[in-house]
Each structure stands twice: as C-alpha cells, then as structure tokens.
C-alpha cells in the first residue's frame, strides 16, 4: 500500500512564460431523485467541492502540474490528494487564467497562473486520502456550486466549460488510460 502523502513545494512544478501551470478537475456524479411511488425519476448532476484552507467558500481540486507528469496525471493526482476521489477524466474543459494573491515566486513574480481543467467522473470516494485532515468534501448541485464557488475562474470553468459540455450531452472526449490510475498509486485494480 502506498503512503497517503501529498506532493508539496514548487521546485518540480511547471512554468511557462511567467505563468505557473495548474491542473484541476470538476469531479461529478449522477444522483436520481425518486417520485412519490419510490421510482427513480430525474437524473441530477452533482459536483464535488472541497473547502478552502485559506478562507470561506468552496473549491474544485487543483494544484501545480509537475515536471514528471502529464497534465492529465496532475489533474487526477490533485483529485486524489485534495478530495479523496478516483475516477475517469471525461472531457477537457479549457484553460483558465487567474492571478494568485499568495503564491508568487521567482518563476511567477506576479502570481500569474494558467489552469487546465477537466471533468472527472467519480468512480470511487476514498475513506483516507492525503489532505483529509484539512479538507471537507461537499456534493452539491451545479446551481449550488455556482453560488458557493470561491474563485471566479473556477465558476467560469463550471459555467462555461462544464455546463456547456453537460448541455452538449456529456460525450466522453478523452481516452481512458492506466496513467490516470498510476498518478494516484499504481493500483490498477481499485476502480
């Protein structure tokens, strides 16, 4: 069994043209409502958000894209580290630019960041994960997520990326790979 340790530090992270490169995802699942007879009726999309460790509001899992991984592997790793979920990347939602107020360094002195965001269909919600002592998970509907999202760029990824993909029928546009699992712990039999 692998250790439940999140990667930390900036010395292995990717930068491009003064921007720190970020990878993240919007984890989601389907929930069915029941009618008065107990039969399944409407299918509802819920997204998983986590608390911010630096203030109010909720976030989607995201973090630095490191030199030894693909952007897809980084997004899957961040979902595991911060939210304790595993699943399949289904669609690339786009690039979103923002300025970090707290994470300025020698490679990005202005704190500029570019996040690559993905839709992740959750297959497994883990009982233990690296940041569980600092994070609380919340499954919310899309309208609830829009209301409680801490950062405008994440709200944009939800409204303009995820919602558009949802409206277009949620067609899978990414090929499933074992690398998605390798980014977490290499155990290919867990999902």
Image (cartoon, rainbow, N blue to C red):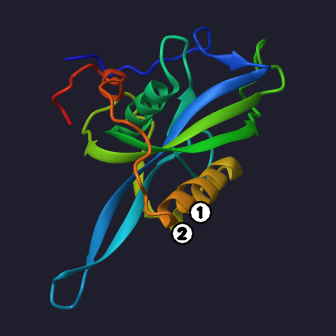
Closer to the camera, 22 or 162?
162
Identified at 33% across, 29% down, the residue is 177
- Graded by Cα atoms within 10 Å as few (under 14), some (14 to 19) or many (20 or more), the crowding at tag 1 reads some
Q: Is 158 located above or below residue 93 in the figure?
A: below
32 left or right of 73 in image: left
Q: Is 1 located above or below residue 34 in the figure?
A: above
Q: Judge whether residue 4 can be spotted in this image.
A: yes
Query: Image quarter for residue 86?
Result: top left
Closer to the camera, 166 or 154?
166
Q: Mark 2 touching mark 1, by CB under 8 A?
A: yes
Closer to the camera, 79 or 160?
160
Residue 105, image x, y percentages: 75, 17
Residue 40, image x, y percentages: 21, 78
Q: Judge whether residue 53 can be spotted in this image.
A: no
**Residue marked by disc 1:** 146
Q: Is 88 located above or below residue 6 in the figure?
A: below
**Which mark, by number, is residue 130?**
none
Closer to the camera, 156 or 149?
156
Residue 49, image x, y percentages: 47, 50
Which residue occupies the extreme top position in the image? 11
173 left or right of 116 in image: left
Task: Look at the numbered disc 2 and give the secondary structure of its residue.
Answer: helix
Task: Look at the numbered disc 1 and give the secondary structure of its residue.
Answer: helix
Identified at 73% across, 39% down, the residue is 97
143 left or right of 39 in image: right
Spatial separation of the CA atoms under disc 2 and disc 1: 5 Å
**Residue marked by disc 2:** 143
The quarter of the image holding the C terminus is: top left
Identified at 68% across, 41% down, the residue is 96
């Amino acid at each position: 069994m692998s250790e439940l340790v999140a990667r930390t530090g900036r010395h292995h992270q990717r930068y491009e043209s003064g921007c720190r490169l970020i990878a993240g995802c919007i984890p989601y699942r389907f929930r069915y409502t029941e009618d008065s007879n107990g039969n399944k009726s409407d299918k509802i999309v819920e997204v998983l958000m986590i608390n911010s460790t630096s203030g109010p509001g909720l976030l989607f899992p995201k973090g630095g894209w490191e030199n030894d991984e693909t952007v897809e592997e980084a997004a899957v790793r961040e979902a595991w580290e911060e939210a304790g979920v595993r699943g399949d990347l289904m669609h690339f939602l786009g690039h979103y630019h923002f300025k970090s107020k707290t994470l300025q360094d020698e490679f990005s002195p202005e704190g500029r960041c570019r996040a690559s965001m993905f839709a992740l269909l959750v297959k497994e919600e883990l009982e233990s994960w690296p940041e569980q002592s600092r994070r609380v998970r919340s499954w919310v509907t899309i309208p609830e997520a829009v209301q409680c999202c801490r950062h405008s760029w994440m709200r944009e990824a939800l409204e303009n990326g995820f919602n558009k993909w949802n409206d277009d029928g949620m067609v899978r546009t990414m090929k499933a790979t074992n690398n998605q699992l390798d980014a977490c712990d290499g155990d290919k039999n867990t999902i």
